[in-house]
Image (spheres, rainbow, N blue to C red):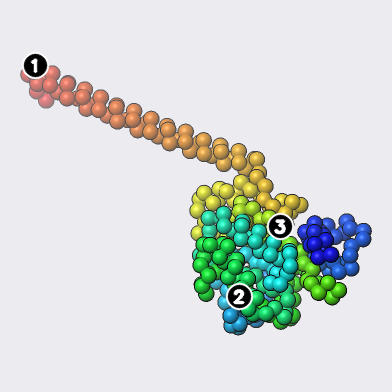
Amino acid sequence: MAAVCALLVVVFCARSSWAQVNAMPRELEHVGVSEHLEGQLPLDTPFRDHLGKPVTLRELFDGKRPVVLTFAYYSCPVLCSMVLSAAVTGLKDVPWTVGKEFEAITISIDPNEPLDRTAKKRASLLKEYGRAGTGEKAGWHFLTGDSASIAAVANAAGFEYEYDERQKQWAHPTVLMITTPEGKMARYLYGLEFPAQDLRLGLLEASQGRSISTVEKLILYCYHYDPQGGKYVLVAMRVMQVGAGAVAMVLIMALALFWGRELRINGRSARFFDRSWQGARERVGVKE
């Protein structure tokens, strides 16, 4: 039953999909995603980190770096591990490093999440990621909290989950979210695979205007987010515009080099002519 529910959650993770289902299982009726783009997360919401230390979201949002946000619960038998592993797999191929150019936060939706299980899951995923170490400043924060704190952030993010009393498991959608450095919702990525290109573009989009290289700006310009497919797609017209601009720059540079060469040649010719003319005048005794 757990596997069947997991597959159903994967397929029907967006609210637009729920409306197309005629016979939705009761335990999945209130599970899905309502995208709250530009919605503000409640940054003063209290949680506990993997060591049990009290922390608020505001302490983890520095106003400079975007944040990858995921919801899970660490005793989940199938789906959560798949989602978190998919996030790690995608982030490993992103040039940016968690804890440096961006932060990552995973919030458990289980208010009774054991502390030791939280710490174990964090250590396991950071080891799998392999680029940020496993210390306190690794940049990937695993949080637990009470029902009110979890619900406050989940509601603000549009993440809808429900406890299945019969199965003793949490039903939830498969989604990875990216927020701005100020804690506003910027992008939602769905499924059990999060391509590095989509993650990179989402982070660039959330960071726009903050220390992005020219090349990264061009990459961001050439792609746009497809809400139907839940991923970024290449825009042919923009690629052509960028290509035309690159060709124009090459032509300008080539012409500049050609004109510079011609000017140098003409300059040398003029100096040679002046010297020859002066020598001839001196030989025939012509004075100024």
Q: Position of residue 269 (x, y in %)?
A: 25, 24
Amino acid at dot 3: Leu
Q: Position of residue 194 (x, y in %)?
A: 66, 56
In the drawing, what numbered circle is on residue 192?
3
Q: Residue at the top extreme?
A: 284
Q: Is residue 24 above or below residue 266?
A: below
In the image, what residue occupies the spot 33% across and 30% down? 261
Q: Residue at the left extreme?
A: 285
Q: Please state if 121 lies on the left or on the right of 214 as rendered.
A: right
Residue 278 seen anywhere in this rendered image of the structure: yes
Q: Please state if 116 lies on the left or on the right of 162 as rendered.
A: left
Amino acid at dot 1: Val
In the drawing, what numbered circle is on residue 101?
none
Label 2 or label 1, whichever lies nearer to me, is: 2
In the image, what residue occupies the spot 66% across and 59% down? 86
Label 3 or label 1, whichever comes before in sequence order: 3
Residue, disc 2: 119
Residue, disc 1: 284
Amino acid at dot 2: Ala
Q: Quadrant of residue 185?
A: bottom right
Q: Is residue 169 above or below residue 285?
A: below
